[in-house]
Image: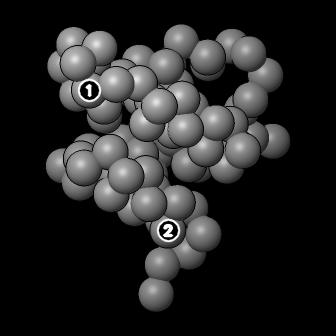
């Protein structure tokens, strides 16, 4: 079975239809809080497809990296 972080990473990858980037999402779940990642995921999923330049996965990764210094890293 998967641990909590792996389950969250798979959930993110599935929601973004981006299983190719699963390892990246696993690293995010190790580094950032679940609440922070879910907030970004909801934001990304709320953006209309026509307003996304590349992919939802790319937008998610960009937003996570942009918020790096905002105090949401795990202890």
Vertical placement of residue 1 versus 71, above or below = below
Badge 1 crowding class, 10 Å Cα cut-off, few under 14, some 14 to 19, many 20 or more, is few
Q: Is residue 33 left or right of residue 59?
A: right
Can residue 33 be seen here? The reply is yes
Q: Nearer the viewer, mark 1 or mark 2?
A: 1
Extreme-bottom residue of the structure? 1
Estimate the x, y position of residue 9 in percent, counting from the top left.
45, 56
Estimate the x, y position of residue 37 in percent, counting from the top left.
60, 40
Q: Which residue shows up at 32% across the image and 45% down it?
A: 16
Q: Is residue 2 left or right of residue 30?
A: left
Q: Which residue shows up at 34% across the image and 25% down it?
A: 48
> Which of the 4 quarters of the picture holds residue 61?
top left
Marks 1/2: CA–CA distance: 25 Å
* Residue at the disc numbered 2: 7
Colour option used: one colour
Vertical placement of residue 61 versus 74, above or below = above
> Which of the 4 quarters of the picture holds residue 4?
bottom right
Q: Which residue shows up at 23% across the image and 18% down it?
A: 50
Estimate the x, y position of residue 74 in percent, counting from the top left.
74, 41
Q: Secondary structure at mark 1?
A: helix
Q: Which residue shows up at 52% across the image and 60% down it?
A: 8
* Residue at the disc numbered 1: 49
């Amino acid at each position: 079975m998967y641990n909590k972080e792996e389950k969250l990473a798979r959930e993110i990858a599935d929601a973004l239809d981006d299983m190719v980037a699963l390892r990246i999402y696993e690293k995010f779940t190790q580094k950032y809080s679940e609440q922070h990642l879910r907030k970004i995921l909801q934001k990304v999923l709320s953006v209309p497809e026509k307003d996304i330049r590349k992919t939802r996965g790319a937008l998610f990764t960009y937003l996570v990296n942009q918020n790096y210094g905002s105090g949401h890293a795990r202890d």
